[in-house]
Image (cartoon, coloured by chain):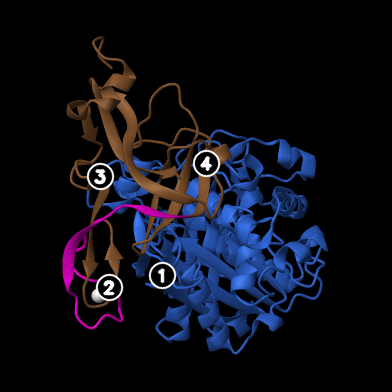
Chain colours: A brown, B blue
Amino acid sequence: MTERYTMNEIANTAALREPCVPGLFSEEEGARLHGARCTCCNTPYFPRVATCRNPSCDESRIVPCTFGGEGKLWSYSVADFPPPPPHRYDQPFVPYAIGVVDLDSGLRVVGQMVDPAEAMQVGARVRLVIEPIHHGDGKAFTSWKFKLL
Amino acid sequence: MHRFGKTGDAIVGEKSVTELCRHAVDMAMKDAGVSWKQVQAVSAASSRFSGGKGWGLNGNDIVEDFGCTGIPVYNLSAGCAAGGNAFNIGYSLVAGGIHDLVLVVGGEVMPKGMIQTSGVADANDPEYLRQRCIGMPGPAFWATLARRRMFDYGTTEEQMAKVTVKARKCSESNPFARFQKAVSLDEVLASPYVSNPLRLFEICPVSNGAAAAVICSKEMARRFTSKPITVATSAVATIGFDDALPRSLAGPVPSGPSFHTEAKSAVLKAFERSGIGPRDISFTELQDNTCYYELAFPEEWGLCEPGEAERLLEAGETAPSGRMPINPSGGFVSFGEATTAMGVFQIAELTWQLRGQAGGRQVPDAKVGLAQTNGLGGNATAAILKR
Ligand SMILES: [Zn+2]
């Protein structure tokens, strides 16, 4: 964190937001995960793959595509203790919920939940968002998360 | 077997993995009445976290330690399923007529705390991405499954805690368990959440320990004993494409419930190959990294009906004296996990149970035992032993 910005200002200033791993997701045109789909068997993939991994697919035909939008919470857990590296988090550590979400587009994705653990309910409707997971060097490092609707 | 413990404690102290394995191998050979010179090959669960020569192994260190007789050594890697894999290779070598007598060994000195990824920032490694982008350690994966079971079957936190109470009761009479003290339901429920809904006493910690077994041909066994324990079968499997569990970052939404496909596949293969069915099993040693597995696995393998496990647990049917005994040894929850030792530790427990040597945790009239392990990377093993 720099002295010129508060944590919230950093998080809300696009130029200071940086993906925690480049190339996996973007937020310029709404929250999107950069994945792929096999046009032969319709299997969705995230992250991207080189070839289709479905053993009953006749011919691997992978095309890049993105995933986002809404889905349903299949289940969730809580990180009650700070996870070991390479995870990074802001001090002091605040426990967060981790959701497994079935996106309407057919992809089951794991991600942190924006809302507190007490608010979670299996089956709840959620939306993919891009949010900071930790701050440092005057930047907000982002990842994909899910927000309860 | 070397009793399980934690680095620095009175049980394992600062012992190296080779020292732990030496103790276990000595004990196994003495038990079998076998001398080192009679061992024709070693099948080792290759250490994941410790071991000599800088790249983690057990087999070569053991041979060096006992004397270089020039025998072949197989070092197997399969995460927590490595011990089961080593047993499978040992069994296959004997069953296939390649060797008459094989030593199987697994042991580990574990790093402290939650198991970490390799530490290399590799954007092509899904495990790195999962930890960097989400922060989802092992217990959170298990907690997700436990939460889903609570939704599907109405399982309560009390019921999950009762699995630990049962397990720790068994451990009281197991001289090899790290924890040998029973715990009350209140004590389990008072332990802090590691990953809600799972609590500290419901999740296996990491431990140091070692286990070994001797496998030989039927003809050779007659030289050593009139009552050998028979390996009915041993099977290995990996995960299926239709597996529904969130192991990586994402996958296709599955069309139905298909959980732990590697474990189910290994166990069903073992049933099929041996002609032994779930109803013939006297007791099971399964991989209970957390209490959830003692509820889910028996249902997935047909040992009982889906959604029935909680009722059986509460009726005492999963205790050693019940109709479906699960983990009479006390399980991973009482031992802690010394990754590569686990599959072999289960074989030792099966053997003692089938011989009627298990003392206070003995399954009455145990005739057939089932052992199962799961390992990172989608590995699983199953073995069926009978007397
Ligand atoms: Zn395909």
The image shows residue A99, relative to residue A105, as above or below, that is above
Q: Which residues are magenta?
A: A47-72
CB contact under 8 Å: marks 2 and 1: no
* Residue B38 can be seen, yes or no: no
| Residue B35, numbered label | none
Query: Does mark 4 have its CB less than 8 Å from ligand 1?
Result: no
User: Where does label 1 land, which residue?
Assistant: B239
| Disc nearest the viewer among 3 and 1 | 3
Q: Quadrant of ligand 1?
A: bottom left
Residue behind label 3 places its C-beta within 8 angstroms of ligand 1: no
Residue at 75% x, 50% y is B165
User: Residue A107, percent across and down?
Assistant: 35, 61
- Name the spot of residue B329 as percent of width and height, x first: 69, 59
Q: Is residue A112 visible?
A: yes
Kindly identify which chain the residue marked by label 4 belongs to.
A
Mark closer to the chain start, 2 or 3:
3
**Alpha carbons under labels 2 and 1: distance apart:** 20 Å
Q: CA distance from mark 3 to mark 1?
A: 34 Å
What residue is disc 2 on?
A42
Circle nearer the viewer, 2 or 3: 3
Count neighbours of disc 3 (C-alpha within 10 A) and say few if under 14, some if 14 to 19, many if 20 or more. few
Please state which amino acid type lies under the numbered disc 3. Answer: Gly
Q: Amino acid at mark 1?
A: Ile
Q: Position of residue A129 (x, y in %)?
A: 33, 42
Q: Are marks 3 and 1 in contact (CB under 8 Å)?
A: no
- The residue tagged 3 is A30
Mark 2 is on which residue type? Asn
- Whether the residue carrying mark 2 lies under 8 Å from ligand 1 is answered with yes
Which residue shows up at 83% across the image and 63% down it? Answer: B315
